Amino acid sequence: MGYGSLVRFGFLLAVLMLTTLVGGCAPRPRDRSRLRVVTTVGMVTDIVQRVAGDDADVIGLFGPGVDPHLYKASFRDVVQLDEADIVFYSGLHLEGKMTDMFEKMSRTKAVIAVAEAIPESLRHKQHDAAGAYDPHVWMDPARWKYILDPIVATLSEARPDHAAVFAARADSLRAGFDSLTAWAKRDIESIPKPRRVLITAHDAFGYFGEAFAIEVQGLQGMSTATDFGLADVTHLVDLMASRGVKAVFVESSVPRKPLEAVVAGCRARGHTVVIGGELFSDAMGAPGTEDGTYFGMIRHNVNTIVGALR
């Protein structure tokens, strides 16, 4: 979003506030004892909420099924961001269409790209974009736990008297990340090695594949904005037929039609392939469900992959 768009949003916000006052309805009073924190994707929102606990109101902008690569800020989003004390987003250009806006906002408030805390040596470079990295780092819990450091530091700066509490919650989460990693490795290893191939709609599982020793093939590139062609479909059909791979996986935030073309191509070759289930890639499940948490999302993905490929 450019500067001109921000100005227009600001003007509309001013009109809305004036209308509210004229109508006789005072704005809802705010509890200043609690931080107001706005986040983007659920994988950030859930971890921030766990660290902040009851010391903050955490508002996630991106709900279930939302594709962050293509997301455009709404008027309500801009209002929420403007009112926030702190903004946490993933970064590494995951929220591509909002990145410029976040960078401008960082001049006046704490706006933190949490994935940038992950050492560059642990990030995957994008082959088709100089200086760019694969943003789907949450797929490896051992890498994703690095985001705890900027979350704790930023919350502690805003509420120094609660710093020890934030740090203790983060320490508990670190142990949870380690346990999740160990469990996932054991389960993925139960898949026969020749069939240990994860085929999805777009290339969001690179870190997952490296962490858990499973080959990953995506029909599209790292961004869902990337097109695919007949050659991409043919490549996957050849691979699956030669390796005896039994399933492909759709994603909750990506249309399933492209992978249906792969299934049809395998059928034409005499190789039966099924849709092995739906995985969470760029978004989590519904709030209030196990799949709507970071740890539950990873467990769901591992269970779905193992159940279909083993």
Image: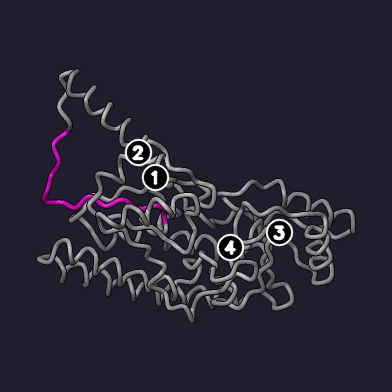
Cβ–Cβ under 8 Å for marks 3 and 1: no
Magenta region: which residues? 28-42
Place residue 125 in its image quadrant: bottom right
Residue at 33 percent across and 58 percent down: it is 88
Closer to the observer: label 3 or label 2?
Answer: 2
Residue at 35 percent across and 53 percent down: it is 104
Cβ–Cβ under 8 Å for marks 4 and 1: no
Q: Amino acid at mark 2?
A: Val
Q: Which residue is mark 2?
A: 7
Q: Amino acid at mark 1?
A: Tyr
Distance of label 2 from label 4 (alpha carbons)? 35 Å
Instruction: Look at the numbered disc 1 and give the secondary structure of its residue.
Output: helix
Nearest to the observer: residue 279 or residue 160? 160
Place residue 148 in its image quadrant: bottom left
Residue at 43 percent across and 61 percent down: it is 91
Label 4: few (<14), some (14–19) or many (≥20) C-alpha neighbours in 10 Å: many
Tell which circle, 4 or 1, labels the residue nearer the N-terminal end: 1
Distance of label 2 from label 1 (alpha carbons)? 6 Å
Q: Which residue is mark 3?
A: 219
